[in-house]
Amino acid sequence: MSNPTIYLYAEALTHIRQLTLHASLQTEKNEHTKILLSSDKKIITALHDGQSASIYLPTQISGTAHVTFPIDKKTEISARLQIDDLGQLKPDIDESGGIEVPWTAGALTANTAIRCKDCGADVLQAGRVTVWKDLPSEHWAELMDFWFCHKPHDNSTHEHAAESKGFSPTSKFTATPRVGLVDAVSFLLHEEDCPNVQNVKHPSRIDSCTLKCPGCGITLGFRQEGEIGYRLFKSRLQVIPDLNQDAEQFPAAIFVCAQLLSLIESSVTRRIVVHADNHTESDLKTEGLMLWIFNPDIYYSSSKRGPTVHRAMKVFYKTLPDPVKFLDANSNVYEELVGTTDDLADFKKSLQESTEILPQSARRFQDWDVGLLDRWEKNATGSAKMDENPLNKKVDEGFELFKLPAGMQELYL
């Protein structure tokens, strides 16, 4: 299949009530090049050299639009469109309850089964865990410690106040048989409930064991030495929430995105260094990533991803050769996010692939690459929720998504 001659990208900037539109052409624009808006103001179509491309806009627009044809970029078209009603997006943003991730305790049942993402080997058999509980945020202990130490005390010191209440930063949750504990990125399960999972000790790390898939041998998580709980990473697993339901699995970037959102929510900085953890069996130094969370909540549409609207974070990123050394010198400026080697590789690949979604002119900012990280939502917001048009449904690859819609009006200069 030949490359399309027209590429469209639209991004909603809710804070300034504007929507930016970019169109890239393979050949130079001419007098027949047009940008059209559907009568319901939800679809943009570009016409050029006898071909057309269309996308849903992330939100409905109003009024006229100023479309520019940059003189020095003969294959680029850009526009700023006024957003008609922020209510189409804002209530969904405000009601979303903050950060959403797959497989919270409420989504799991006594019939939930967990398998290896790569080979499908059983990790947790259905019926083994009968109760699921959500763990608090990883920052809960620090917040409780802060609150308690600034609360008046009688005959006790601040240093030991939190510890005496059981919620110091060193507090740990203990795994219990038949009870599954869930946080944003992992499951904490009792070893008796996962009899097939293999424990592998690393000769240079006596404080933890790596947990391996019994089928293919990939790393599923880790266990601290002397503890009975297995920490299993969601990104390495597939989950069947209930009987007669299909297995679900998600890319590592979904879970890393949730961690990034949690970090910037509890921190004053949006600059984060992501690097591999010390629970894996590899002693080789791996590169990290330096991230700048430019905008944690955007809606965009891209003709490279089909017509649906996506909620995402816009992230600037660059490779970091020695992340640990960098953090030692800049710990007061950058937050740290530690993940597995496999997740870091998958996350980096997702970022690089997302850069290709952006228009050519928007893929770099100074010495940073620009990427998009999808925000997972249980219930889609934006046009994907508002509009039940079949074009918003998933279709087979190669299906012709758009024909020129009826009732189009041209966006004039």
Image (cartoon, grey):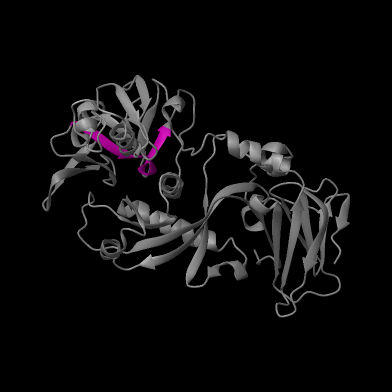
Q: Can residue 155 be found in the magenta stretch?
A: no
| Image position of 280 (left or right of 73) | left
Residue occupying the point 72% across, 40% down: 390
Question: In the rendered view, does 244 fall on the left or right side of 93?
Answer: left
Which residue, as the protein is rendered here, is positioned at the far bottom?
Answer: 72
Locate residue 181, reporting x and y percent: 33, 29
In this view, the residue in front, 397 or 287, is 287
Question: What residue appears at the point 82 percent right and 69 percent down from the top-left corner?
Answer: 33
396 or 92, which lies in front?
Answer: 92
Q: Position of residue 62 (x, y in %)?
A: 81, 50
Name the residue rendered at 31%, 63% in the picture: 330
Q: Quadrant of residue 326?
A: bottom left
Instruction: Please provide percent x and percent y for residue 52.
Output: 77, 61
Task: Locate residue 134: give its quadrant.
Answer: top left
Q: Is residue 31 above or below residue 197?
A: below
Which quadrant of the view contains residue 123? Answer: top left
Q: Is residue 319 left or right of residue 170?
A: right
Q: Which residues are magenta?
A: 228-239
Magenta stretch: helix, strand or loop mostly = strand
- The one nearer the camera, 394 or 389, is 389
- Percent x, y for residue 388? 72, 36
